[in-house]
Amino acid sequence: MTYELAHSEAIRKAARWLATAPRHEVQPAAVPALKSRFGLTAREAVAAIREANLIKARAA
């Protein structure tokens, strides 16, 4: 597995978690929660938030 593929998979996992996690587990700050839970950088956490928003929009 390449470095980029591993990181994109981590972002996808974080996005799935964020899209389905209870709000109290994520609030008030999603970026620190994603960084600590998944070991993402701030940039990767933001990418995961974007992906989670797309997941939620598709589910609606």
Image (cartoon, grey):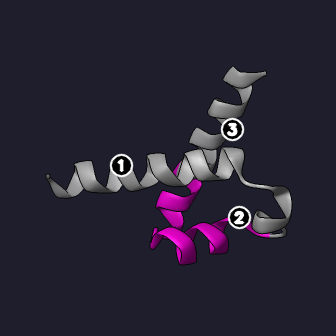
Q: Which mark is residue 1?
A: none
**Over which residues does the magenta segment extend?**
29-47
Within 10 angstroms of label 1, few (less than 14), some, or many (20 or more) residues? few
Within 10 angstroms of label 3, few (less than 14), some, or many (20 or more) residues? some
Alpha-carbon span between mark 1 and mark 2: 18 Å
Q: Determine the secondary structure under disc 3.
A: helix
Per the image, the residue denoted by label 2 is 30
Which mark's residue is nearer the viewer, 1 or 3? 1
The residue at the point 57 percent across, 45 percent down is 16
Upstream in sequence: badge 1 or badge 3: 1
Three-letter code for the amino acid on which mark 1 is drawn: Glu
Per the image, the residue denoted by label 1 is 9
Within 10 angstroms of label 2, few (less than 14), some, or many (20 or more) residues? some
Alpha-carbon span between mark 1 and mark 3: 17 Å
Three-letter code for the amino acid on which mark 3 is drawn: Asn
CB atoms at circles 1 and 3 under 8 Å apart? no
Alpha-carbon span between mark 2 and mark 3: 12 Å
Upstream in sequence: badge 2 or badge 3: 2
Residue 14 versus residue 40 in the image, above or below:
above
State left or right for residue 55 relative to residue 28.
left
Instruction: Decide which of 21, 36 is in the foreground and name it.
Output: 21
Look at the image and say whether residue 38 sits in the magenta stretch.
Answer: yes
Look at the image and say whether residue 20 sits in the magenta stretch.
Answer: no
The residue at the point 33 percent across, 56 percent down is 7
Question: Residue 6: image x %, image y %?
Answer: 27, 55
Three-letter code for the amino acid on which mark 2 is drawn: Ala
Question: Residue 11: image x %, image y %?
Answer: 45, 52
Per the image, the residue denoted by label 3 is 53
Upstream in sequence: badge 1 or badge 2: 1
Question: Residue 41: image x %, image y %?
Answer: 46, 70
Q: Determine the secondary structure under disc 2.
A: helix
Identify the main secondary structure in magenta. helix
